[in-house]
Amino acid sequence: MTEVLPDLPDLRAAFWRGVMPRRPRPAAVTTKEVVVPGHTPDPEALARYARVCGFTLRDALPPTWLHVLTFPLHLHLLADPGTTLPLAGLVHVRNRMRLHRPTLLTEQLEIGSGIGNLRPHRRGALVDLTGRVHVGAELVWEGVTTYLARGAQVAGAAGSAHHSRDARQDSFVPATEPGGAGAIWRLPADLGRQYSEVSGDPNPIHTSRLAAKAVGFARPIIHGMWTHARVLAALENRLPDSYEVAVEFTKPILLPGTVGFAAAPRPGGWDAAVTTRDGSKPYLLARIDY
């Protein structure tokens, strides 16, 4: 079943609906998809996003901005009564997206999303949120966002060695990374607030010390999708019109903080990493393929 919405749903309403306590049930997700058939990008919103993430403002939309447009549909599906995963317990572990061709600010977009591929994990369950952007009948962008639902139980999974495999074995990104940091990025204490304002993400663990401490972090953490976007912004003048990028989030970045960035070209693409300042431990691993 496909649910058609007139516009992107309100993020805050979907978020708070998704974090409301639910009766414990076996992990399940809704079978429906959701689509917004006509969306015109907002130039001012794009300009604010580009400034926070480091992109050059141009007519072509950053691939991660297209993810931002699908995110309200992701929350809508996670808050659906047919989805039993607790939104408050979800951890964004990896992301993959393919830009099929430059998508222009002046084009009207059809934005769609689905949820599925629920599978067991040693710490709970993994689930994929998909996103698709069409211009007319042409698919111009698609993405897969993978979350870990900590503590969730998938029926029939207990005691199976196959179902207890580590998240890295389910990964899109090989466990390799470029050499030591080639650049240093200093992340201010209010970066979470800045990104929340331009992306619409209402999760308070990025803006509130109390909320962050409630889930085990000493300070607010920056959004994984800001880090993802910042990597692409650093490489944007070296990337072709069409490419696929896969990232794995290996460790949260506390705010304020200082991180390293390194990237290395290879035949057919790039490998990149955001690391601790000395380059010894990764926060994000990225692989870009043409």
Image (cartoon, rainbow, N blue to C red):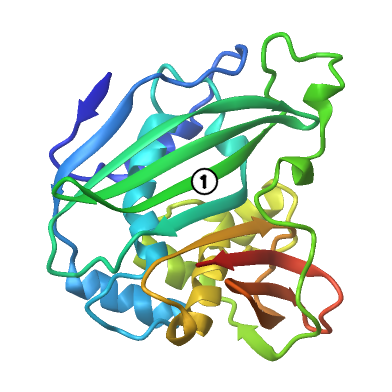
Q: Quadrant of the N terminus?
A: top left
Query: Looking at the picture, does residue 129 appear above or below residue 155?
Result: below
207 displayed left or right of 14? right
- The structure residue drawn at horizontal position 44% and vertical position 87%, both measured from the top left corner, is 237
Q: Secondary structure beneath disc 1?
A: strand
Observer-nearest of 287 and 36: 287
Is 83 drawn above or below residue 53 in the view shown?
above
Query: Which residue is located at x 49 percent, y 45 percent?
Result: 144
* Residue at the bottom extreme of this rendering: 183
Q: Which residue is at 81% across, 80% downward?
A: 279
Q: Amino acid at mark 1?
A: Thr
Counting from the top left corner in percent of width and height, residue 47 is at 28, 78
Quick one: label 1, few (<14), some, or many (20+) residues within 10 Å? many
Q: How many marks?
A: 1
Q: On the picture, is 288 further left or further right than 71?
A: right
Residue at 45% across / 68% down in the picture?
Answer: 195
Q: Quadrant of residue 67?
A: bottom left
The x, y position of residue 28, in whole percent, is: 54, 17
Please give left or right for residue 68 compared with residue 8 in the image: right
Position in image of residue 162 (x %, y %): 81, 23
Q: In the drawing, does residue 263 fall left or right of residue 44?
A: right
Above/below status of 46 relative to 128: below
Q: Residue furthest top?
A: 156
Between residues 113 and 177, which one lies in front from this camera angle?
177
Does residue 41 appear anywhere in the picture? yes
Q: Position of residue 166 (x, y in %)?
A: 81, 38
Q: Which residue is mark 1?
A: 145
Is residue 190 in sight in this rendering?
no
